[in-house]
Amino acid sequence: MSEAVSRRSAIRLLAGAGAALGAAGCAPSVPPGAGRGTAPPAPPAPAAGAPGADAADGAARVDSLLERLTLEEKTALLHGARDPAPLGQAGYVPGVPRLGIPALRLADGPAGVRVATPATALPAPVLLASAFDPALAREYGRVLGREGRALGLDVLLAPMANLIRTPYAGRNFETFAEDPRLTADLVAEVIRGIQDEGLIAAVKHFALYNQEKGRDTVDVIAAERTLHETELRGFEAAVAAGAGAVVGAYNKVNGVYACESGPLLGEVLRGAWGFDGWVISDREAVHSTVAAISAGLDVEMPGATHFGAPLREAVRGGSVSQDTVDLAVHRVLSTLDRFGLLTDRPAARPARDAAAGARTARKVAAAGAVLLRNERGTLPLAGAAARSIAVIGPTGQVPFVSGGGSAHVVPDAAAAPLAAIRQRAGNGSTVRHALGEDLYGRPLPPVLLRPPADLDDRRLEAGRTWSHQGTFTLTAADEWTLLVHYTGQRPSVRLDGEELFPVRQGVAEQFAGGLLGTAPDGMAVRRRTLALKAGAHRLAVSARGGAAGQRFRLRLTTRASRAADLAEAVKAAKAARSVVLFAYEDATEGTDRTSLALPGGQERLIEAVAAANPRTTVVLNTSSSTTMPWLSRTGAVLQTYYPGQEGAGATADILFGDVDPGGRLTQTFPADEDATPFGGNPLRYPGVGGRQEHTEGVHVGHRWYDAQRTAPLFPFGHGLSYTTWQYEKLVVRPEHGGLRVEFTVRNSGRRKGTEVAQVYVGPSPELKLDQPVRALAGYRRLTLAPGQAQRVTVTIDPRALSSWDPERHAWVLGGGRREVFAGRSSRELPLRSKAVVRSR
């Protein structure tokens, strides 16, 4: 046997040992060899795409390929490159044609497959999570998987398993929940769904990527126990579900960049969890060659800065061993083989089923909508209130499909809520619309400037340039918002010598929001709000046609135009029997929120409209929790986040009572901006001096509110129904090392309804560790007819009763008399009982 063959065999044995560790159980244990606790987790379910009877053939195939690859070809498999036939996707890895190793295309996809062509724009994952329905999560994943395969992709960079830790984080809509248990359940099912269809799922972002501010450099400090009990739970579940790939995060974790962290990639991911897939960096998240590949990073994206020529030089110079490179290549090839991509006849790509995708999108959008408030019978709309409606707000007329950044998807089509409401209200009804707030501006009057200029729809042919300089005079100080809409290179707009729309750095330039960054006709939009003094001002505009020509326009809002929009909305509200007011908050990758309040003049709009008509329903298209100083004046509030391409129809279904609002909050809504885990504590968020600390420990989300006895605006798990519910007859008893919880849920109202029954568990008296006051231990979504009752059984497994012991580096079962709660939310728990958990 040659030395090379011996080395390949060793690599295969190492990979097999990792898989065996994963099959033996998913209880992390760092450092390797430390004693394990007494709470063995349930074994992971068989993974989609897992090796079957031909595993030995696959291993031999991978070994044979590895033998024949040159060093240049090996490193080409370990970094991204320019796609010769791009689909508009996020990444491309060239294959090795001479050996039949295919090229790989990777796309973003947490809320739909993001390529240049239309795809099903699914509701944001946070809305999916609000349904508390793992089966629905798997269906969601299958849409992603089928569409990804149909659109020519091999790897989907999804789902996002990071927790909603702070309400300010710009990408909260892309992930699931503040709760580790719920996140883990849903992440696992989305991955299974994606991979059921033969697409490789790449769970992201490993780990502690919970904010956009300073994401490339921030050093996130978290204790071992905090890591395992909070952020790592979703990733551990992803590995147990068979995820083919993991995406490394931008940030540092405990002093080391995540993409070169040996403790994360080596000890936890591969050692304790037995992950044998490949680790991909996020875009430009690699900062080294030797440290990154030695820690366990396999593929650099999007280019070859560190894993191209520098990696080959490191091998030749001896600072990286050939075996290290071979092991990374082996992981890539083994995953491709697992998904049938190395066979002579790979599975044919399916046809895209846009209709099926749309059906799932609508199902999810309706299932996850959360009714936060409903006073005076405001909803569902019925009788005279359903025949005379004022729809107010810009997102009543312009569908708000998805947030900005890598989760933004171009849908096949998306109806406006106004159209869906008119259709549902039917003939004989009056449904009027008032803008309320102008997002895209009005044309500048041509006579505003001296000399005059029409700046509303300028067309430039390819290669042409156009410019105009003029002056205007304000008789009084004013607040203007100037907006430029354009199709090509952004025009230059200078006011009193200052460029209003300079090119920004990085993702801040690339991602401008899912709503505000694009006009209804598809033109890109940038805006700038300015306080202008009375007197003369200079405005200079110049534009280039570029290679393809372009259109552009300059638009404007002023105090007077905003006052007119508000007055029109109030007039419409007074004339209608009921009001549906759509409010928005446009979040995007690359930018955190600066406030939890609704942006612009929306708070004033809601106050004025609700004063004019108390039967006002506010529909929130927001990314995360929102403060609501206007709440008490409204009739109802419906949270629909970013509802995808079918959001209009789903929203109408809820408003008119065709569907019971069965969504529940997966994150706490604080009463105000100070009453959060981060109020007055910048070290927790956004960090101080580039360092951010998870000093809240295991008390994430609702656990912090309980520990601090802080009253939220709306608690985790909250959501109203159009019917009423009773909880009865709680029985708790030990079973299989955990607890069996039984209780009765009764629909005590007059309408068919959907309920999410939730079970929480209190701390163990035997563990000398800081524990949550209550932790989510299980839940059950059920739909019952009026008067119907159902006996619900929730099994609390040993993991839900365990804590991570940092001295033993293992999960330990929390024995003793444990209190169990059941009810409708983390703060509405009418049933409680106790049972003894035996830790030995």
Image (spheres, rainbow, N blue to C red):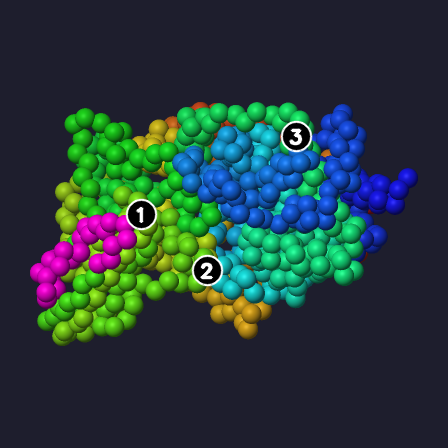
User: Which residue appears at 47% of the width and 40% of the height?
Assistant: 87
User: Which residue appears at 66% of the width and 30% of the height?
Assistant: 340
Q: In x, y percent, where is residue 486?
A: 28, 52
Q: In x, y percent, where is residue 427?
A: 19, 26
User: Which residue appears at 75% of the width and 47% of the height?
Assistant: 326
**Residue at the disc numbered 3:** 340
User: Which residue appears at 23% of the width and 32% of the height?
Assistant: 422
Kindly indicate whether the residue at mark 2 contacts the one at mark 1 (C-beta within 8 angstroms). Answer: no
**Residue at the disc numbered 2:** 506
**Residue at the disc numbered 1:** 548
Element assignment for label 3: loop
Left or right of 317, for residue 198: left
Element assignment for label 2: loop
In the image shown, does 486 or 614 lie closer to the viewer? 486
Give the amino acid at mark 1: Ala
- Magenta stretch, overall SS: loop
Left or right of 828, for residue 340: right
Q: In x, y percent, where is residue 358?
A: 41, 30
In the image shown, does 418 or 104 lie closer to the viewer? 104
